[in-house]
Amino acid sequence: MARITFSTKGFKQSIHDELAFQRQKKRSPPSPEARPTFLEWLRISWPDILTMIAIGAIGLGFDKMWPPYHRLFPYLDTDGTIISPELAYRKRPPTLSAALSGILSIGIPILVFLFSQFLTPSFWVLNNSLFGILYANLLGTCLQIMIKTLVGGFRPHFLSVCQPDLSRPGASQGLNGIYHDWSICTGEAKDVKNALISFPSGHTEAAFASGVFLSLWLNAQLKVWSAYQPRFWKVVVVFVPLLGAVLMAGDLQMTGNHHWYDMLMGAVVGTMVAFAGYRAMFESVWDARTNDVVVLRRSQMIVAGERTKDRGRSTDSGDLV
């Protein structure tokens, strides 16, 4: 007859393992697939939405302003020759209007983000991707408009739209009277104002804000620069948004709407806000292990089921800060 024994050691170990699992589960970050209700999402996101509206309003306010300075420009030398031919180009519209450039810069990344949801659906990845691209574009647009208004510069077609009248007050300043104030312009006011705010290039800033952000996002999703060799098509895909940004910027130089240094500064501003927007939404930029991991707020973690103190993947201690 076989002897039947009951051991409490195995039972206690099972209880211990289960409790350890539950504690670890409680500490773990919430699943990115946890979808909140609309009201929960709004409670999480309303401070950011209001901030974005405020940043947009600030940019719009600066856009309506005339430059507060009266920058001087050279026109004719004492012998009647044009001193600055680089400001005498014919006015030509860019191939892409400002509105179309903005739509493409925002629309193409959004379409890519939405398409990715058919392959690997994740609410918070989509949410953070959309907020990240909006952060980059709104902040970049506000910055470049402020710089345009407060610093500015003459476009290559400035003299063509200015149509200077040397008999007006403000003419003939500086040595030999070769410098003039833009108040001597007789052209259309809106064209003159636009010709005074060349630096930096807004088209270029928007193109690089979206192009660099999308390139970083594609790199993270496709794991191009990681611990293993990627397929060449993935490398090509990551560079496509950058090529698009460069082509959009190059068109402005070809049509005489900007100087090279306008586009350079626009690209710098766009790249900076793209990195800032991406890192604000994802755990890293270059680390292939975490650059596709969304960063959550405390309020997002609560909605997703987290009830413990912050342990490393939430970004703040409340809804407002």
Image: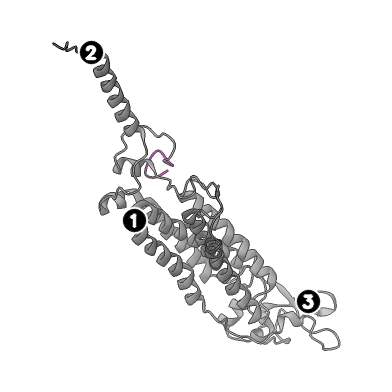
Q: Residue at x 74, y 80 (%)?
A: 86
Q: Are marks 3 and 1 in contact (CB under 8 Å)?
A: no
Q: Is residue 316 magenta?
A: yes
Q: Is residue 260 left or right of residue 1?
A: right
Q: Quadrant of residue 252?
A: bottom right
**Foreground residue among 162 and 108:** 108
Residue located beneath label 2 in the image = 7
Residue located beneath label 1 in the image = 121
* Magenta span: 315-321
Given the current orientation, which residue lies at the most extreme left position?
A: 1
Q: Earlier in the sequence, mark 3 or mark 1?
A: 1
What amino acid is at disc 3?
A: Gln
**Foreground residue among 142 and 16:** 16
Q: Are marks 2 and 1 in contact (CB under 8 Å)?
A: no
Q: Residue at x 52, y 69 (%)?
A: 63
Viewer-nearest of labels 2 and 1? 2
